[in-house]
Amino acid sequence: MAVAEIDALTAAIKQKAPPGVDIVIPPRVFEEMGAEIIDFERNAYLTVRVPALDRYSGPLGAMQGGMIGAAFDNAYGPFSYLVAKRPCVTKTMDTMFIRPIKAGDDALIVRAELLAKTRSLLFLQGRATNEAGKLVATSTTTMVILQHDQLANMK
């Protein structure tokens, strides 16, 4: 993984922020979920490992779907910033669940990949597997690349 490249891109994104706009990288939810970047190839993919903690479980003891969605977002978010070299926000995100992942026993491995990029949008897809490599869920998302004036309005 190109840790130095990720750090350099992150610093550049923060530096470009309009006055008064605080960009928190990694986002607090990334840290709260215990996510960690485990693989990265610029403009191709980013892979994140997220523990399937007991506190993320639904009534049957499996990781709740919303938390799996948040795990996808924790891969899409950092990856979108690294691809666009600017802040991005989620416009749409669709997730299809394949099999449960038992909370407390495993981790979710989420790989976000770039499908296409326009001037204002990113189209990404993701796959989430358990640590044994079995498919847990798939996802697609459309991310909006924020322009400087849109960032200034977020103060």
Image (cartoon, rainbow, N blue to C red):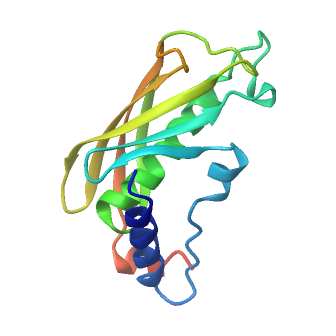
- Residue at (19% x, 62% y) in the render: 119
Relative to 31, 112 lies left or right: left
Please tell me which residue lies in front, 21 or 132: 132
Residue 149 position in % (x across, y down): 37, 80
Residue 101 position in % (x across, y down): 63, 15
Instruction: In the rendered view, tell whether residue 112 sits above or below residue 60.
Output: below
Q: Is residue 87 visible?
A: no
Instruction: In the rendered view, tell whether residue 63 sits above or below residue 4.
Output: above
Relative to 64, 16 lies left or right: left
- Residue at (55% x, 80% y) in the render: 21
- Residue at (45% x, 83% y) in the render: 15
Instruction: State which quadrant residue 3 falls in.
Output: bottom left
Residue 127 position in % (x across, y down): 41, 26
Please tell me which residue lies in front, 115 or 89: 115
- Residue at (44% x, 56% y) in the render: 89
Relative to 28, 23 lies left or right: left
Q: Quadrant of the C terminus?
A: bottom right
